[in-house]
Amino acid sequence: MPVAKQKAIALPGEPEPVLPPTTRLNLNLSKQARHKLDELCEQTGETITEAVRRSLDLRVYMHECGLRGERVVIVSPDNSMRELVMSRF
């Protein structure tokens, strides 16, 4: 069975990643989380697999920012700012 090609996802300022071989993953989601994932995929046109990959990449990036002592800030259209704080549990 052929394996679908993956798109490399590079975050801003990061080098293009080298793609490892694919690994199958079974994921248990609550109904609410699945609904949110379905809505995201519908809005972005991504597959569920691609949405999960991109979400993981973003989470890793934010974790690495925190390790470096950096902060993630969201700037609204009116230029107000909020810091995005990731809880650790």
Image: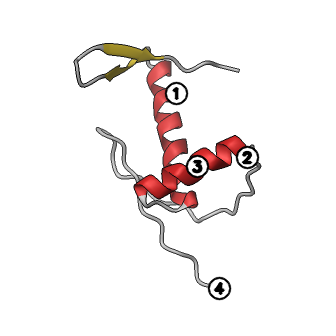
Q: Are marks 3 and 2 in contact (CB under 8 Å)?
A: yes
Residue 76 in the image: x percent, y percent? 29, 23
The part of the image, by quadrant, that contains residue 88 is top right
- Closer mark to the observer between disc 1 and disc 2: 2
* Label 4 sits on residue: 1
Disc on the earlier residue, 1 or 3: 3
Secondary structure beneath label 3: helix
Disc on the earlier residue, 1 or 4: 4
Q: Are marks 1 and 3 in contact (CB under 8 Å)?
A: no
- Residue drawn at x 55%, y 21% is 86
- Amino acid type at mark 4: Met
Quadrant holding the N terminus: bottom right
Residue 62 seen:
yes
Q: Are marks 4 and 2 in contact (CB under 8 Å)?
A: no
* Label 3 sits on residue: 37
Residue 62 in the image: x percent, y percent? 47, 29
- Amino acid type at mark 1: His
- Amino acid type at mark 3: Leu
Answer left or right for 10 relative to 37. Answer: left
Disc on the earlier residue, 1 or 2: 2
* Label 1 sits on residue: 63
